[in-house]
Image (spheres, rainbow, N blue to C red):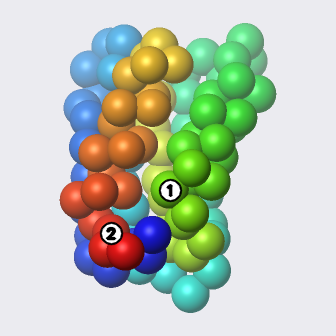
Amino acid sequence: MEIRKNAAAGTLESSDIFICVEPYDQLSVQIQSVVQEQYMEAIHHTVFQVLEEFGVKSGKIRVNDRGALDCVIRARMETAIRRGGSR
């Protein structure tokens, strides 16, 4: 899937995650998290796994995590990608 327009999903509330996607000529992923010391590796893994599942090879992805569970990260990633992308 190709990111064709700016899109977002989620909130900055506690236990949620805010994800922005926008078109870009290469893949750029920026992750910020309030729980990065404990869970950055898991967050990184989930974000890149969803990108791979959707075949996203380019785009600027900005992730601002507020302690979201894995299932929430997946849901927000999928929503942002679907809103901003096209096959």
Label 1 crowding class (10 Å Cα cut-off): few <14, some 14-19, many 20+? Answer: some
Residues at marks 2 and 1 touching, judged by CB atoms closer than 8 Å: yes
| Count of numbered badges drawn on the protein | 2
Which residue has dot 2 on it?
85
Amino acid beneath label 2: Gly
Residue at 56% across / 63% down in the picture?
55
Tell me: 7 left or right of 72. Answer: left
Q: Which image quadrant is residue 47 in? A: top right
Which residue has dot 1 on it?
54
Q: Secondary structure at mark 1?
A: loop
Tell me if residue 30 can be seen: no
Coordinates of residue 23 in the picture (x, y in percent): 41, 79
C-alpha separation, residue under disc 2 versus residue under disc 1 = 10 Å
Please tell me whether residue 69 is drawn above or below residue 86 in the rendered image: above
Tell me if residue 39 can be seen: yes
Coordinates of residue 81 in the picture (x, y in percent): 36, 56
Q: Which image quadrant is residue 77 in? A: top left
Coordinates of residue 79 in the picture (x, y in percent): 28, 45
Coordinates of residue 5 in the picture (x, y in percent): 27, 76
Q: Residue furthest bottom?
A: 25
Residue at 50% across / 56% down in the picture?
54
Q: Secondary structure at mark 2?
A: strand
Q: State the quadrant of the N terminus.
A: bottom left
Please tell me whether residue 67 is drawn above or below residue 86 in the rendered image: above
Please tell me whether residue 73 is drawn above or below residue 62 in the rendered image: above
Q: Which image quadrant is residue 64 in? A: top left
Tell me: 34 left or right of 38. Answer: left
Residue at 32% across / 13% down in the picture?
14
- Which of pointers 2 and 1 lies earlier in the amino acid sequence? 1
Comparing marks 2 and 1, which lies closer to the viewer?
Answer: 1
**Residue 37, which numbered label?**
none
Amino acid beneath label 1: Phe
